[in-house]
């Protein structure tokens, strides 16, 4: 079943899925999970999926309880920014929120 079908059946599909992933995560585990999510973001080409994944990344940073920029994210920030700029809505809202959270200008 594709994510669209799952979302049709459960409007909280992504939220619930992200909760299952992060439920038992320690702050270190959340911080170490950040590169995985950044790699996924770089591969996505759907506005909605990018939007959801950016909020997941924000959630991971909340669990990690830090504003320290992960070295992998730091190395790939310009690539990520250029990729997400192609998607107007995610760039304007969750990406801007993500950058504010990390105090990135």
Image (cartoon, helix red, strand yellow):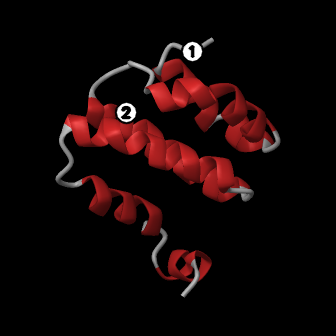
Badge 1 marks a residue whose secondary structure is loop
Closer to us: 103 or 13: 103
Closer to us: 26 or 23: 26
Q: Which of the 4 image quarters holds residue 80?
A: top right
Judge whether residue 51 can be spotted in this image: no
Q: Give the image location of residue 73, x and y in percent.
A: 53, 30
Tell me which label, 1 or 2, sits earlier in the chain. 2
Q: Is residue 87 left or right of residue 93?
A: right
- Give the number of marks: 2
Q: Say above or below: 47 vs 78.
A: below
Q: Which quadrant is the N terminus positioned in?
A: bottom right
Closer to us: 62 or 28: 28
Q: Give the image location of residue 93, x and y in percent.
A: 64, 35
Badge 2 marks a residue whose secondary structure is helix
Q: CA distance from mark 1 to mark 2?
A: 14 Å
Judge whether residue 87 can be spotted in this image: yes
Q: Residue at x 25, y 42 (%)?
A: 29
Q: Give the image location of residue 44, x and y in percent.
A: 68, 56
Q: Give the image location of residue 35, x and y in percent.
A: 46, 41
Closer to us: 68 or 89: 68
**Dot 1 alpha-carbon crowd within 10 angstroms: few under 14, some 14 to 19, many 20 or more:** few
Q: Residue at x 66, y 47 (%)?
A: 42
Which dot marks residue 83?
Answer: none
Q: Say above or below: 18 vs 32.
A: below
Q: Is residue 34 left or right of residue 95?
A: left
Q: Residue at x 80, y 40 (%)?
A: 88
Q: Which residue is mark 2?
A: 61
Q: Residue at x 28, y 63 (%)?
A: 20
Q: Which quadrant is the C terminus positioned in?
A: top right
Q: Which residue is mark 1?
A: 104
Dots 1 and 2: beta carbons under 8 Å?
no
Q: Say above or below: 60 vs 100.
A: below
């Amino acid at each position: 079943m594709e994510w669209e079908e799952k979302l049709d059946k459960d409007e909280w599909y992504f939220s619930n899925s992200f909760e299952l992933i992060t439920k038992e995560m320690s702050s270190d585990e959340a911080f170490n999970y950040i590169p995985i999510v950044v790699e996924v973001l770089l591969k996505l080409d759907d506005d909605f999926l990018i939007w959801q994944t950016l909020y997941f990344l924000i959630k991971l940073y909340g669990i990690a309880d830090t504003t320290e920029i992960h070295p992998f994210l730091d190395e790939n920030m310009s690539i990520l920014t250029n990729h997400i700029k192609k998607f107007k809505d995610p760039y304007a809202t969750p990406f801007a929120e993500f950058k504010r959270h990390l105090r990135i200008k």
